[in-house]
Image (cartoon, rainbow, N blue to C red):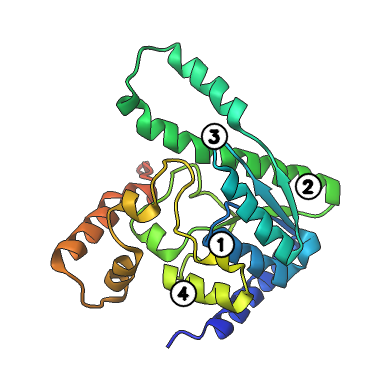
Amino acid sequence: MFNAEKEKNKIVQFIRDYYKENNLGGVVIGISGGKDSGVVAGLFTEALGKENVLGVTLPCHSRKEDREDAKLVADYFGFNLINVDLTEVYDTFKNEINKLGNFTEEELKDSDINVKPRLRMATFYYLAALYSMIKKKRYIVAGTGNKCEIYVGYFTKGGDSVSDIITIGDLTVDEVIKVGEALNVPKKVLYKTPDDGLSGMSDEEKIGVKYSDIAKVINGEEVDEEIKDKVLKKHKANQHKFNIPTYKKDNE
């Protein structure tokens, strides 16, 4: 049986051990206003102290509510939260793309959605380098993806797939919530319907499968065959996000 308090403590120790081993000092975390980033922020605050956690909100034609929820997390755990508005950056990028041709909204849809997390990740790494210089200690970027998302490839290559340390990547959504309860993550954030804040759809609507069903497939539990097939197809179809084919020359 999953023991949330025990798991929380093990993750906190995992963070501390990694930081000590690699002489690291701080962390940059994208705070979306959702449970995953809220739990990751809580874990790092407990592991490193609030003074070594930098939370970042990166609105890009985003909802005001998400930033308000991010502030709830930052206020509760006490870490510094900064805001970098990427709306104009995104719009400038789009203006340049529009010069290449008259594309339909349907043609642009996936590209538009995926460029936003890529812009955000570039910003996280910029800030990690900047704060490393300012604070005179090494800052790294924390990932916030959970096991269910990762399993079906629900992330953007070169965007939220990129990070220096992953703390909840082996926890299902239900387990993330339980750890969040152990951390006392604000309830409004912890039980909020998860979405990417970019597409206007919930995560489950975009994936087409419930997180609870994905967890069942991962754990080998009984689930409707049609749902199981859908989950496994997504898992297989997104293997390209995990493995980069690399040519190896013959050593003759």
- Give left or right: position of 9 versus 214: right
The residue under the point 77% across, 60% down is 52
Foreground: 228 or 205? 205
Between marks 3 and 2 in the image, the one whose residue lies nearer the viewer: 3
- Give left or right: position of 85 versus 144: right
Between marks 1 and 4 in the image, the one whose residue lies nearer the viewer: 1
Between marks 3 and 4 in the image, the one whose residue lies nearer the viewer: 3
Pointers 4 and 2 in contact (C-beta within 8 Å): no
Q: CA distance from mark 4 to mark 2?
A: 32 Å
Q: Amino acid at mark 4?
A: Glu
The residue under the point 36% across, 31% down is 109
Tell me where residue 33 sits by quadrant: bottom right
Name the residue carrying label 3. 61
Q: Amino acid at mark 2?
A: Tyr
Pointers 3 and 4 in contact (C-beta within 8 Å): no
Name the residue carrying label 4. 175
Instruction: Say whether disc 1 or disc 3 marks the residue closer to the N-terminus.
Output: 3
In the rendering, at what x and y percent does residue 242 appear?
39, 52
Q: CA distance from mark 1 to mark 4?
A: 15 Å
Instruction: Say whether disc 1 or disc 2 marks the residue closer to the N-terminus.
Output: 2
Foreground: 42 or 142? 42
Tell me where residue 13 sits by quadrant: bottom right
Pointers 1 and 4 in contact (C-beta within 8 Å): no
Pointers 1 and 2 in contact (C-beta within 8 Å): no
The residue under the point 51% across, 17% down is 95
Name the residue carrying label 2. 131
In the rendering, at what x and y percent does residue 207 appear?
32, 52
